[in-house]
Image (spheres, helix red, strand yellow):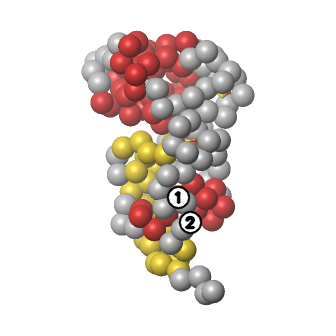
Amino acid sequence: MVDILYPISLMVNGKTVQAEVSADLRLLDFLRNDLNLTGAKEVCAEGECGACTVVLDGKTVNSCLILAVETDESELTTIEGLSDGKILTQMQKAFVDHHSVQCGYCIPGMVLTGEQIVKDHDSPSRKTIQEDLSGNICRCTGYQKIVEAIEKVGHEFHE
Ligand code: FES
Ligand code: FES
């Protein structure tokens, strides 16, 4: 059977991307395999772990649950789009300063979700941060240092 391809055009990390994709291609695979943006990771493939988190039109989403064809005319940010690798965002710096990273597998999703939390809440409490982080699973850190990093940025963000 011939695979039908659909044209899509979207902004990825500030650049226009045009491609032809099959109807069943997941956004996660499009990013990792076609665009070589490997920050988003696959763990559960069921929308449970948040390792594949990206920002789609201003909201964090699980890219394992979205089809690439659905992102036509949208704006997407991955962890690679947060900084140029030399100047870290406040959130990335807080993760480093608080020693919030162990194996690192969950961290792209944690950082992007952390950025979303401080945008959504003025000085978020630990409870709010824990609730909003509930879709992101980390099997190494015990979460405490991740929550502390987000809390610190949350206090500074709206000053
Ligand atoms: S791989 Fe997408 S939520 Fe786990
Ligand atoms: S740092 Fe290893 S899974 Fe979170």
Where on the picture, by quarter, is residue 99? top right
Using the image, tell me which numbered label, if any, was put on residue 27: 1
Q: In the rendered structure, are the residues bearing label 1 and label 2 in contact, judged by CB atoms less than 8 Å apart?
A: yes
Residue density around tag 2, few if under 14, some if 14–19, many if 20 or more, within 10 Å: some
The three-letter amino acid code for the residue at tag 2 is Leu
The three-letter amino acid code for the residue at tag 1 is Leu
Q: Which structural element holds mark 2?
A: loop
Residue 71 location in percent, x, y?
A: 42, 62
Which residue is at 57% across, 54% downward? Answer: 28
Q: For the N terminus, give its image quadrant.
A: bottom right
In the image, residue 4 sits, relative to residue 43, either above or below, namely below
Q: Which structural element holds mark 1?
A: helix
Quadrant in which ligand 1 is drawn: top right
Residue 15 in view of the camera: no
Residue 56 location in percent, x, y?
A: 40, 51
Using the image, tell me which numbered label, if any, was put on residue 25: 2
In the image, residue 134 sits, relative to residue 23, either above or below, namely above
Q: For the C terminus, give its image quadrant.
A: top left
